[in-house]
Image: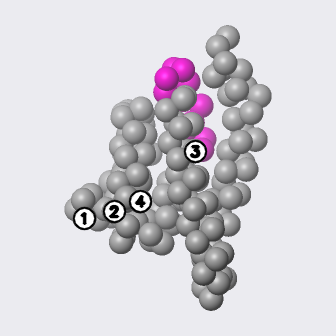
């Protein structure tokens, strides 16, 4: 068993629960619209979460364990859509990273119908057109 398999068995579920909790908090910007420090922190948190989801998907793919990501994809896509609404429409760096992760997921799971549907939603197409 390689280290990725060991991580997946022991920690992946707990890690994803924590990341999804942080993702939910990071996209609740309405409650903090008057606090620039909090908004800046939430922006940094979203960027870090995007990086973590990207690294996890890469690791799962590299370890030939990508199928274990399937139960988490819906929440990842929810986060990506919310992030797009908040920053992706005007920050090209964010838009590129979001599109890159969506493309990676589509590449890792080319036969998954849910991935095909999520990869062609209007917000994804709008980001691609902007690039």
Q: Is residue 10 above or below residue 89?
A: above
Q: Is residue 105 left or right of residue 23?
A: left
Q: Residue furthest bottom?
A: 34
Mark 4–mark 2 distance (CA, rounded to whole Å): 5 Å
First reached walking from the N terminus: tag 1 or tag 4: 4
Q: Which residue is mark 4?
A: 94
Mark 1–mark 4 distance (CA, rounded to whole Å): 12 Å
Q: Is residue 103 left or right of residue 75?
A: left
Q: Which residue is mark 2?
A: 92
Q: Position of residue 78 (x, y in %)?
A: 53, 59
Instruction: Determine the image quadrant of residue 71.
Output: top right
Specify few, some or many for label 2: CA neighbours under 10 Å numbering under 14, 14-19, or 20 or more. some
Which residue is at the front of the view, 108 or 28?
A: 28
In the rendered structure, are the residues bearing label 3 and label 1 in contact, judged by CB atoms less than 8 Å apart? no
Of the numbered discs in the image, which one, if any, rests on residue 20?
A: none
Please give the range of residues in magenta.
Answer: 61-72
Which residue is at the front of the view, 55 or 120?
A: 55
Whether residue 19 is visible: yes
Mark 3–mark 1 distance (CA, rounded to whole Å): 24 Å
Q: Is residue 101 magenta?
A: no
Per the image, label 2 sits on a secondary structure element best described as: helix
Q: Which residue is mark 1?
A: 130
Whether residue 27 is visible: no
Q: Position of residue 16 (x, y in %)?
A: 68, 44
Q: Quadrant of the C terminus?
A: bottom left
In the rendered structure, are the residues bearing label 4 and label 2 in contact, judged by CB atoms less than 8 Å apart? yes
Residue mark closest to the camera, 1 vs 4: 4
First reached walking from the N terminus: tag 2 or tag 1: 2
Mark 2–mark 1 distance (CA, rounded to whole Å): 8 Å
């Amino acid at each position: 068993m390689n280290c990725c398999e060991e991580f997946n068995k022991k920690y992946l579920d707990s890690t994803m629960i924590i990341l999804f909790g942080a993702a939910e908090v990071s996209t609740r910007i309405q409650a903090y619209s008057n606090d620039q420090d909090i908004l800046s922190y939430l922006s940094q948190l979203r960027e870090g979460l995007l990086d973590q989801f990207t690294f996890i998907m890469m690791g799962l793919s590299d370890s030939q364990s990508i199928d274990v990501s399937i139960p988490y994809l819906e929440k990842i896509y929810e986060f990506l859509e919310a992030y797009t609404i908040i920053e992706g429409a005007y920050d090209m760096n964010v838009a590129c990273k979001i599109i890159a992760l969506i493309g990676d997921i589509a590449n890792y799971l080319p036969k998954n119908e849910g991935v095909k549907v999520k990869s062609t939603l209007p917000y994804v197409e709008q980001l691609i057109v902007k690039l």
